[in-house]
Image: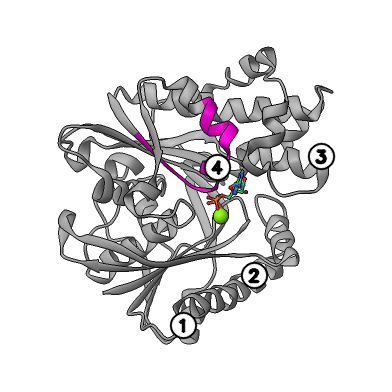
Amino acid sequence: MIVAGIMSGTSLDGIDVAIVEIEGRGWNKKVRTIAASTTPYPEPVRAALLGVSNCETHTAGIAMLHFLLPELYAKAVKKLAGAAKIDLVGCHGQTIIHIGKPRRYLGHRVSATLQIGDGSVLAERLGVPVVSDFRPRDMAAGGQGAPLVPYVDYLLFRHKTRGRVALNIGGIANITAIPAGAAPGQVIAFDTGPGNMVMDQLVERLNGRRYDRNGAIGRRGQVREELLGGLLKDRFYGQRPPKSAGREDYGAAFVARLIATGLPMPDLIATATALTARTIALGIRHTGVAAKDLIAAGGGAHNGFLMDLLRGQLPDVNVTTTAGFGIDVDAKEAVAFAILAHEAWRNEPNNLPSATGARRAVVMGKISR
Ligand SMILES: Nc1ncnc2c1ncn2[C@@H]1O[C@H](COP(=O)(O)OP(=O)(O)O)[C@@H](O)[C@H]1O
Ligand SMILES: [Mg+2]
């Protein structure tokens, strides 16, 4: 089956599309990437998405984006696919809020999430069935609706004799720890803290650019240990999984606190980079899994300074990327949503309860035929 996966993450950088061929059943299926691309969000779209993320907003803004995004997604898929025939599409959508843990609300305990980008519009434009809106079903079954990629990490990277950790460095960083010879229920996965999100906002403030290309600015700065030590005191880093983080944790308010220190921007960027590296390493240690390989993906894998800091934190681990496994680092999450869609289409459960905290395995995703 040929499946296109579409992912747009919390960095709000753009639309990642991957086209994959999936063969076989269960945990032994074979996945091959055929093509992958990233299409940047037009600046006004990015600004509008920021304007409806975790804030008081107008319902019209959300509804319009809900219907506009699938038009952009469809264009990105068509451009990548060309004449190639696709059987199915899996679309994560754009998260504008995620409250994975139930909160007290109007006298009830409620968890909630919203990924916009309507599946019906996408299905109509592409003329193939679309699976979208994955997270709610896991949450309905008592899970946090995240992380979802560990199911795919287990499928692709598990090893009989080597403990492995898959790492994604998007806006937020998350890890999937897979002990050697693990059963699915032994997989441990959670968000470790910030990925690129804090660095990105600092860089934008400094020079209007989107990110610290290859980590050049951070490398020139000085990691301020005192500030870093204070940041590491946040209870989140010591909490047991399942746990998830988002723009609500590392958005404008978090960055404003850093800027208020008055420290030079390169030092703040270096410190934010170190916060990402340290909390990833902390997270890996907390899993207790004897990791031989760390397999990184996501845009942060391009940040050479960050990767060097990570290697420094994990001297006994072979730090590598998904590229060595035939998966472009920028395409991994899009590949993941192609696979999750494939399972949904076949009516196979596609959440990993050990990762999300769900009471049971469920089939996530809604199908627009
Ligand atoms: N060459 C690069 N150098 C440093 N950072 C990069 C580079 N390319 C991408 N990034 C980082 O990766 C981010 C996008 O990563 P991505 O995996 O798409 O995250 P998300 O899933 O949150 O959208 C960018 O915002 C940027 O911080
Ligand atoms: Mg992205």
> Could you tell me the amino acid type at mark 3?
Leu
Q: Nearer the viewer, mark 4 or mark 2?
A: 4
- Say which amino acid is labelled 1: Gly
Q: Within the magenta stretch, is there residue 304?
A: yes
Q: Residue at x 15, y 63 (%)?
A: 25
Q: Earlier in the sequence, mark 4 or mark 2?
A: 2
The residue carrying pointer 4 sits among few (fewer than 14), some (14 to 19) or many (20 or more) residues within 10 Å by Cα, namely many
- For mark 1, give the secondary structure: loop
- The residue indicated by pointer 2 is 65
Q: Position of residue 337 (x, y in %)?
A: 39, 61
Q: Residues within 10 Å of mark 1 (few under 14, many from 20)?
A: few
**Residue picked out by circle 4:** 300
Measure the C-alpha gap from mark 3 to mark 4. Answer: 19 Å
Q: Is residue 163 above or below residue 136?
A: above
Which residue is nearer to you in this view: 55 or 4? Answer: 4
Nearer-N-terminus badge (3/4): 3
Which quadrant holds the N terminus? bottom left
Q: Are marks 3 and 4 in contact (CB under 8 Å)?
A: no
Q: CA distance from mark 4 to mark 1?
A: 29 Å
Residue located beneath label 1 in the image:
82
Report the Cα–Cα distance between label 4 and label 2: 27 Å
